[in-house]
Amino acid sequence: MNARIGQGFGAVGAPVVAVWRHGWAIYSVFAQVVWAIVTGAIRWREVVRQAYLIGNRSLFFITVTLGFLGLISVYQVASQIQRILPDFTMMGPAFIQLMWREFAPTITGLMVATRVGSGIAAEIGSMVVTEQVDALRMCNADPVRYLIVPRTVASAVMLVMLTIYAVFVATLAGMALADVVFNVDPSTFVSFRLVTTADVALGLAKALSYGFWIPIVAGQAGLSATGGSAGVGWATTRAVVSSSFAVILLDFIISGFGYVVLNL
Amino acid sequence: MIEFIDIHKSFGPKHVLRGVSLTVDEGQVLYLIGSSGAGKSVLVKHLVGLLKPDSGRIILDGRDITWLREDEFYAVRKTCAMVFQNSTLFDSMSVLDNVALPYRKHHRLSRADASRRAREKLALVHMEHAARRFPGDLGDGLRKRVAIARALTLDPQFVIFDEPTTGLDPVAADNVDDLIRSLRNDTGVTSIVVSHDLRSIFSVADRIAMIYDGHIRLDGTPDDFRRSDDPVVQQFINGRPDGPMKI
């Protein structure tokens, strides 16, 4: 009987302990990154290189994804409007507001989490299993400062840039579809009358926080890789799942704070 | 002097080291041998803080370094360098930048000063001609030499070589053996060499320690090993496939 109770507690407790350890490991990397940034221990040359890899190399990906999102969203919304009240005046302004508030930062964040998060975890994970991270430690180069801090700074900056670009691409795609399919004049569609400073601030705050957390979560997954190529594979999978989850969670927290607490 | 005292280390359910005690004297070349997965690399990584023991102590020149923090280990790593099994050069950096990295990180030298000193170390291993090349352009033997140059940048008192001749052709392996010998003879460096290479072991070692089943099976001179009547030792040093060794 006691053995069964013990097994029951074990079955419940083991995942809780695993989640706690995982969370603590991510928090530990987060604290080191913040400390490095506060103390100015940033390799700016590497930040520029990473900004190019994270930002410029994602442009095509973001253009395609957000372009299609703009087309599909506007088509669906316009189809409903056409059936109920055939007045498209507010469609463009509401679409642009929604892009700023929600879709541009979050979809861009999820895209970067998959593309960049997996790359970071695979690169750092490979360095761990081939002992390059140990070699860095032997050279007095802290792996978090050396590998994760430049990626975090670059990703935070570039995700803000990519989000602004994403709004532009989605609006352009939506405007073109509205014009061609529903005969909505571009000057009617592209209107910022519903977009407030708070909407833009909320969207950019989300982008900044996603950009900050994705390399931390993915980098921690890479640093915890064990074994050989299979271990790197698992680390990469964990990085994509965890960083995508982080984006959704941060979206929930920041949106809740913005809409409920600040009443935006 | 280096002392490992009753070191235990497990990875999950696998108890790799089960109370290893070993002393390495100043200026000695100690070869650590044993089958793959016996825990040789695990043991030496404790010396430079890349792993922490579950229990036991590590004493370096009379100082207990077992539970130093990561930042405190940086001082230890200045005196105790390590050449890794896979060379572990950073592919995105030139050979010169790889060797200059410890100068820039440990001594905070400028890029120019670090590069100048790095060239001197590359000359020691006859690799100055490859300074501007990238590690990916070099063969295994040359990469190993660069890795040794990087390990020697801070003029360490102790050097750990983790399987330095594995995967090298006989000539490249002989070059590495010569380097280990000349380090001992010319600069008095104490070396711990993790190796399976029987030819190197018996031509370079001052002392050999064999790890088997989580313990030190035999610790002695090359002659002690040749004369040993322990069937496990004899099976290993003669490379016999059949015998009492658990694989």
Image (cartoon, coloured by chain):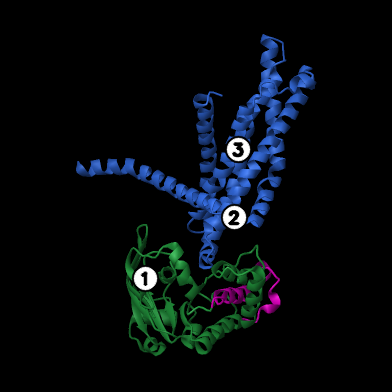
Q: Earlier in the sequence, mark 3 or mark 2?
A: 2
Compare residues A184 and B217 and report the one nearer the observer. A184
Question: Whole-Å distance between the Cαs marked 3 and 2?
Answer: 21 Å
Furthest-top residue in this view: A85
Q: Position of residue B9 (x, y in %)?
A: 35, 64
- Give the number of the disc on residue B46: none
Task: Kindly state the secondary structure of the residue where label 1 is placed.
Answer: loop
Q: Position of residue A227 (x, y in %)?
A: 48, 58
- Residue at label 1? B246
Mark 3, chain letter? A
Which label lies toward us, 2 or 1? 2
Question: Whole-Å distance between the Cαs marked 1 and 3?
Answer: 56 Å
Compare residues A188 and A240 and report the one nearer the observer. A188
The colour of chain A is: blue
- Give the number of the disc on residue A207: 3
Q: Quarter of the image containing the N terminus of chain A?
A: top left
Seen in the picture, residue A19 relative to A230 is either above or below; the reply is above
Q: Position of residue B125 (x, y in %)?
A: 62, 81
